[in-house]
Amino acid sequence: MPAGVARAFKVFVFLACLWPGADLAYNAFWGDLGVNPVETLQRTSGESALVMLLCSLAVTPIRRVTGWNRLQHLRRMLGLWAFFYALSHLAFYVLFDQACLYWSDCQLAAIVDDVVKRKFILSGMVAFLAMLPLALTSTQGWIRRLGRRWQTLHRLAYLAGAAGAIHFVWKTKVPEPRPYAYAAVLVVLLLVRVYFSWQKRRTSTSGGHGL
Ligand code: HEM
C-alpha cells in the first residue's frame, strides 16, 4: 500500500471513529437525542466501543492476508478510540443510572451491588477492566519497557471483545441479530489468529521451510 494512500486511510478511519462522539455531542447541545436521551448516549457509546474494539482486532489478520503492513498503525488508534467510548459509556452509567453527579451523591456500594447482581453489568465491567491496562500501556515507553510481555498482555483485547459481545447478548431482552453478529465476528477473528499461530509454530518446527 503506498504511503500516501495509507495516510489518507488513517485520516478517514480517525474521522469515522470521531463521528459517533461528535454526532452525540452535537445532538446533545444543539440537536435532539430522541425520546430517551440517556439510552441514546449509552447505546451509541457502548456499540461504538465494541465496533472499534473488533476493528482493532481485525487489523493484524487483514495485514497478514493482504501484506499491507502500514495498516498496523491503525490498531493502536482504533484501540484507543474503543477505550474512549468505553470510558464515556461507563461515565454515562455512573452519571445517569447511578445518579452519581457529585462525589457526595455516589454510592459505591450500590454500584458494586449492581455489578454483582446483574450479570450483564458484570460482563461490561470485565470488558472495561480488560481494556484499561491496554490503554494504559499503549505508549511507546510501555511497549519498550514490557518487551515481549506487551504482546502477551495485549491478548486481553480478545477477553475484552468476548466480554463486550456477551454483555450485548445479555443486555438484549428481545432477540435481535446485532449482538450475535458481533460475537460471530469475534469468533472468526479468534479462529484466524489460532490458524496463524499454528502455521507459525509448524514453520518453526519444520526448520523454517513451511513444511
Ligand atoms: C464499564 C462497565 C459497563 C457498564 C456498567 C455498562 C452498562 C451498560 C448499560 C446500562 C447498557 C444498557 C443501555 C440501554 O439499553 O439503555 C449497556 C449497553 C451496551 N454496552 Fe455496556 N457497559 C459497560 C461496559 C461496556 C463495554 C466495555 C462495552 C464494549 C466493549 C460495552 C458495550 C455495550 C453495548 C454494545 C451495549 C448495547 C448497545 C445497544 O443496545 O445498541 N459496554 N451497557
Image (tube, rainbow, N blue to C red):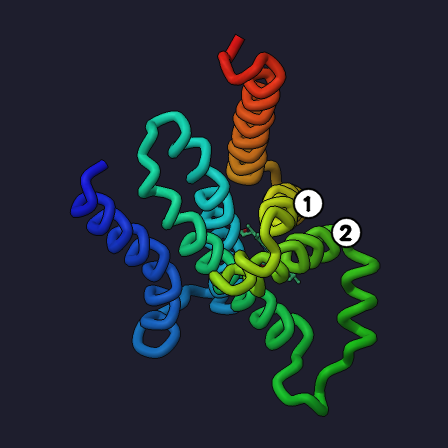
Which three-letter amino acid code belongs to the residue tagged 2?
Lys
Q: Return the residue found at the far bottom.
A: 104
Q: Return the residue found at the far front.
A: 207
The percent position of residue 72, horizontal first and vertical second, equals 39, 44
Circle 2: element type: helix
Which three-letter amino acid code belongs to the residue tagged 1?
Trp
Label disc, if present, on residue 170 of the rendered structure: 1
The percent position of residue 202, horizontal first and vertical second, equals 59, 16
Taking the spot 61% from the left edge, 42% from the top edge, the residue there is 158
Image quadrant of ligand 1 equals bottom right
Q: Are marks 2 and 1 in contact (CB under 8 Å)?
A: yes
Q: Earlier in the sequence, mark 2 or mark 1?
A: 2
Taking the spot 52% from the left edge, 17% from the top edge, the residue there is 208
Relative side of 180 to 71, left or right: right
Quadrant where the N terminus sits is: top left
Q: Which residue is mark 2?
A: 119
- Viewer-closest of 2 and 210: 210
Circle 1: element type: helix
- Viewer-closest of 12 and 4: 4
- Viewer-closest of 154 and 208: 208
Q: Quadrant of residue 204?
A: top right
The percent position of residue 21, horizontal first and vertical second, equals 39, 64
